[in-house]
Image (tube, grey):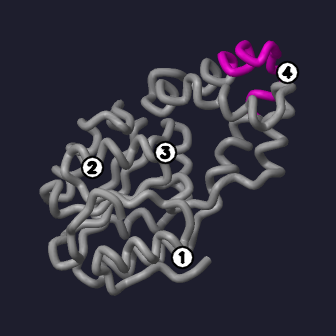
Amino acid sequence: MSGSNHQQSDVKAVIFDYGEVLCHPPTSAETRRLASFFGVNVDRLSALWERNRGPYDRGDLTAEAYWSMLAADAGSTIGPGQMEEICELDMAMWSNVNSSMVEWARQLGSSGFKVGLLSNMHPDMVTHCRKHFSWLKDFDFVTFSGEVRLIKPDPAIYEHTLRGLGVAASEAVFLDDRAVNIDAARKLGITAIHVRSMALLRNDLQAAGFAIFPASS
């Protein structure tokens, strides 16, 4: 775990990202289907998806505005009735919860750690998660970008989460799948683990002195 010298005894809180940490990544079939709405390949979709995702996740853009902008960037248009299909697919793609990670968060909470969630997530997805994911109640503090109108890697959203958990940066471990978010956390003094696979995560946790690990999924 590069940039960290903390041990488990120093840690009071573990903060989880949502996408590709508490949930599995979209399947290739889902991604291809989404790309087909815009007449582009998967690689092109990835670039276009990122272009305005920050403002969307911060709540600055409506779903209709975001997807219409993506379509325009792709040189296509959204046909009648397709907007609802696109929005439903987007939420379904990010709803495959990683039960091993959720259970690990529960175990951490039962072992005396505070557990937090810090995610860039647009307001419609936030509503979906709060409606369907009862396990959110197991987290001591939840930060969704679409609710606080801040997004990672803005330092303010990390600080908001630390305040909500009542811990100092040096007392927190943060898990995220994006290097830019990991770097931002480390600059604030948070121990951060770049989640790339379950095997590597277990290795990083062991190096940090943790004795409680997520099950293989």
177 up-or-down from 88: above or below: below
Q: Is residue 4 left or right of residue 44?
A: left
Give the mark, 1 or 4, whose residue is nearer the N terminus.
4
* Residue at (44% x, 76% y) in the render: 203
Q: CA distance from mark 3 to mark 2?
A: 26 Å
Q: Is residue 123 left or right of residue 182?
A: right
Residue 100 - label: 1
Depth order, front residue of 190/104: 190
Give the mark, 4 or 2, whose residue is nearer the N terminus.
4
The number of numbered discs placed on residues in the rendered structure image is 4
Magenta includes 74?
yes
Give the mark, 1 or 2, whose residue is nearer the N terminus.
1
Where is residue 49 drawn, in percent x and y?
64, 30
Q: CA distance from mark 3 to mark 4?
A: 26 Å
Give the mark, 1 or 3, whose residue is nearer the N terminus.
1
Q: Report which residue position mark 4 lands on.
A: 80
* Residue at (27% x, 84% y) in the render: 111
Q: CA distance from mark 4 to mark 2?
A: 46 Å
Q: Are marks 4 and 2 in contact (CB under 8 Å)?
A: no
The amino acid type found where label 2 is placed reads Arg
Q: Report which residue position mark 2 lands on.
A: 186
Magenta includes 82?
yes
Q: Report which residue position mark 3 lands on.
A: 126
Depth order, front residue of 84/98: 98
Bounds of the magenta span? Answer: 68-84
* Residue at (78% x, 37% y) in the render: 42
Q: Residues within 10 Å of mark 4 (few under 14, many from 20)?
A: few
